[in-house]
Image (cartoon, rainbow, N blue to C red):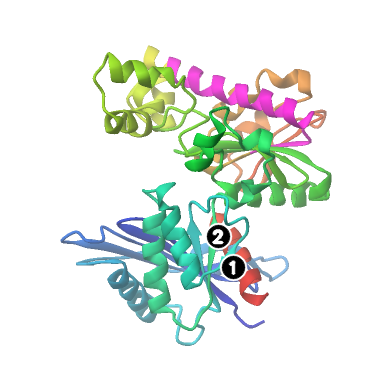
Amino acid sequence: MSVVPVLVINSGSSSFKYQLLDMSTERTLASGLVERIGEPVGVARHTVYAASTSAAAGEVTGTPTFLDATRTRELPISDHTAGFAVMLEAFASDGPSLADNPPVAVGHRVVHGGARFFEPTLITPLVEINIDELSVLAPLHNPANLAGILAARRAFPDAPHVAVFDTAFHQTLAPAAYTYAIDADVAASHRIRRYGFHGTSHKFVSEAAAAFVGRPLEDLKQIVFHLGNGASVTAIDGGRSVDTSMGFTPLEGLVMGTRSGDIDPAVLFQLARRGGMTIDDLDDLLNKRSGLLGLAGSNDLRDIRAGIERGDERAVLAFEVYVHRLRTYAGAYLAQLGGADIISFTAGVGENAPHVRAGALETLGFAGVEIDPDRNESPERGIRVISTDASRVTVLVVPTDEELEIARQTLAVSRA
C-alpha cells in the first residue's frame, strides 16, 4: 500500500507542533516541536516512529513506537519561516524523507472560525484574510495560527492547505444555546455569542465512541468531557453538538488549570470599582491566576491529589469545587439531551485521573450511571469501558487524537 502523507500543523505565537501521518494506515510517521521562536536560542525536537506490528496477525497498527530517541537541537530560530526550514532539515536528516513522499496536503489547526467557517476549508488568500479579521475574537490564537499557515505555504507551495477550526463542530448549536441574554443590537455589533471550542476533540471522541460500541452515531446521545489544563464538556445528539460549556471565549464553563470558568460577571464590576483592577488585570486574573492554580497554588491535579493526601485544606476544596462543576454540567446536559447513551472522558486529566471520573459521576445513579471501580482504576490504555455491565449509560475513556482528526478532515477536503 502506497504512503499517503498528510502534515498537521498546530502553530502558536512562539512555537509550533507538527505531525506527519500516513493516512493509508492512519499511522504517525514523525512528530516534532519547534519552540522559543524569536528568542536568542530556539529549540527543535523531532521524533521518528516505527510501525508497531501485531505478532498474531502481522498487521501494521496505528500505535507508534519510538524508532530512535528524540533528537533535540538548540539554535537561533528568528521566525516561523525559519522554524519551518529547521523542520525540513530534520525530516531530511532524520527522516522520513519528504523528498520521496511529499505531503499530499497540509492541515492547520485554527482556533476561531467565528460564524463564518463551519467546516474544514481549503485555504486561499481570502480565507487568510478572514482568519486574520477574526483575530478580534481570538487575539492570542488566530494571529499565531495564521503565521504558521503563511510559513507552511511558503515551505509547501504545491500542496493544498486546509484550515480546521476548533469552533466548527459547534456551529450546529441552536440559537437558544448560543445566544446570550444581553442587548441584541450590542451582541450583533460585536459578534457576541457562544462559539465553543475543543470541537475537533469532541468530534473525534464522539465518533470513536460510537464505533467502539458498534452503534450508529446518529442514534446516540453523548456527553464528552475534554479535561486537560483547558477543559470543556459537550452534549452531542446524533453526532451534532447541541450544547457546550465554553462560550464566547474558552474562559467560560468548567474550572480549569488556570481559568476560573463560570463566574458572576458582577464580581468583575466589584473588583474594578472597589479593588482598582483594570481590564488587563481582570483578564490576567481569570485566565492565568484562577482555576486550580488560584484555589490551591498548582494547576496540576497530581499536585492537588498529593495535597489532599497530606490533608491540605486548600487542595481538598479545590478538588471539591472542580468536581462540583463537572457534576453541574453533567446534570444539565442529561436534562438537555433527555438522558444519555454514552459519557466519555478524554484528554490529559480525563484519560489519566480515575478519581476525577468517579467524582464527576458519583451522584448520577438516578440517570442509570454506574461506575465499576476496578475498571475505572485500571492502568489499561486505549479506549475502554469503565461502567458496570448493568449500567444503563456506557461510560468510556477515549484517548483523543486531534491531529488524526485534522488529518482526516484535511485529506477529505483536499480530495473533494
Q: Say left or right for 17 vs 121.
A: left
* Mark 1 closeness class: few <14, some 14–19, many ≥20 residues within 10 Å: many
| Vertical order, 254 against 93 (above or below) | above
Name the residue that disc number 2 marks: 164
Instruction: Reply yes or no: does residue 328 show up in magenta.
Output: yes
Provide the residue span drawn in magenta.
Answer: 317-344
Quadrant, the C terminus: bottom right
Residue 311 seen in render: no
Name the residue that disc number 1 marks: 410
Marks 1/2 in contact by CB < 8 Å: the verdict is yes
Q: Look at 65% across and 20% down and name the residue there.
A: 362
Q: Look at 25% across and 57% down and name the residue there.
A: 36
Give the residue type that dot 1 points to: Thr
Give the residue type that dot 2 points to: Val
- Mark closest to the chain's N terminus, 1 or 2: 2
Q: Nearer the viewer, residue 301 or 50?
A: 301
Q: Say left or right for 175 vs 326.
A: right
Does dot 2 land on a helix, a strand or a loop? strand
Q: Look at 30% across and 64% down and name the residue there.
A: 44
